[in-house]
Image (spheres, rainbow, N blue to C red):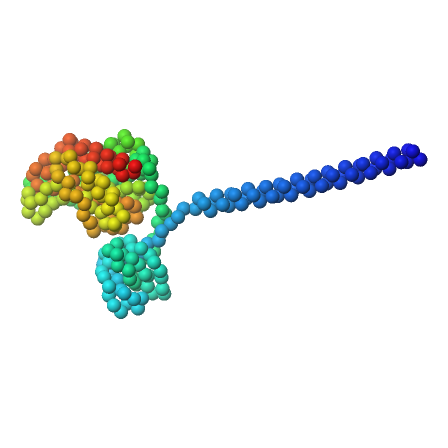
Amino acid sequence: MKKWMMAGACAALVLLACFKIGLFEQTTTAEQTADHAKVTSESTNDTATSTPETETFIKVGKGDRTLYTDASFTTPLATVNGGELTEYLSKTAEAYQVRTNDGYTGYLSTDDGTEVTKTIQEAPSDLSDAVIVLDPGHGGSDTGALSNDEQTEEKTITLSTAKKVKAELEKAGATVYLTHTADELVPLADICTYSEKKQADVFISLHADSTEYANEATGITTYYYYGEEKSLAQSIANSFSDLPLESRGVETGNYQVLRENLQPSVLVEMGYMNNDEDLSELTSDTYQQQIADSLTRALTDYFK
């Protein structure tokens, strides 16, 4: 009898232990499932958070197009420059509602524009974190403007200066690309594509100006196209204040490399090819280095 009672007690203890083990295993499995769900949820949230923001524009087709007051295209409102990146507002079956760079809100035929999406980049807080694309104006068969004696070509000056600018910016830690490093012609559309491919924080096209008559004008002009780039252009123009050639300030410029460029863009006319005094500066290593120093200083201040 005593042995039977002891055997029964042992069996009960075994059953209790098995029950506890089973309960523990169920609890552990439930906790693991909950933890896995939490990790999965956090991973999903992280993925959602890291998805880059985008902005959609309507790029106007080649050649100027008409903007209308209504989607039925009965009343013309304004003319929009070909290639302009207009702000996308809405769409109907046959029309885009857009806001132009000049501030007009109206309707553009879907045949006159295409949707272009840009990833919104976080602006760097220091030049050392920035990507700069430099475009030496002209090249190859496109000589650009000529000196009064037609012996000096604009393309030679822009390429030489761009290389000095690149070297100076790289000393400051920036990542710098040239649209071309040799005497070659790069199509304007390809220049814009290159700027976008490199995700330039700033794009600068370097040129030398010319007028109808010799020795008619002098100085440096900085151009921008979109209103949000005016502050960048102004920062650059201000940096030229101590150069031998006077800064003429900033102006809007309807240039393809600015108008069709998704990246922040400016174009600098560093002087006048057909002004003899300007030319003597443009062709000197000293002046080209001063341009490089000024642009580096301007971009350092701009990103801060």
Residue most extreme to the right? 1
Q: Report which quarter residue 154 is drawn in.
A: top left
Q: Report which quarter residue 156 is drawn in.
A: top left
Q: Residue at x 30, y 48 (%)?
A: 262
Q: Quadrant of the C terminus?
A: top left
| Location of residue 247 with respect to 65 vertically, above or below | above
Q: Residue at x 31, y 66 (%)?
A: 71
Answer whether residue 154 is visible to the viewer in this image: no
Q: Residue at x 15, y 40 (%)?
A: 247
Q: Quadrant of the N terminus?
A: top right
Q: Report which quarter residue 232 is drawn in.
A: top left
| Location of residue 196 with respect to 169 vertically, above or below | below
For this view, does 24 lie left or right of residue 163? Answer: right
For this view, does 282 lie left or right of residue 79? Answer: left
Q: Where in the figure is residue 294, as x and y percent of width and height?
A: 20, 35
Q: Where in the figure is residue 278, as x and y percent of width and height?
A: 10, 38
Q: Where in the figure is residue 292, as x and y percent of width and height?
A: 21, 34
Q: Residue at x 24, y 65 (%)?
A: 76
For this view, does 294 lie left or right of residue 71? Answer: left
Of residues 65 and 28, the one nearer the viewer is 28
Q: Where in the figure is residue 69, as x and y percent of width and height?
A: 27, 65
Instruction: Count numbered badges in the picture.
Output: 0
Answer whether residue 72 is visible to the viewer in this image: yes
| Location of residue 129 with respect to 230 vertically, above or below | above
Of residues 191 and 10, the one nearer the viewer is 10
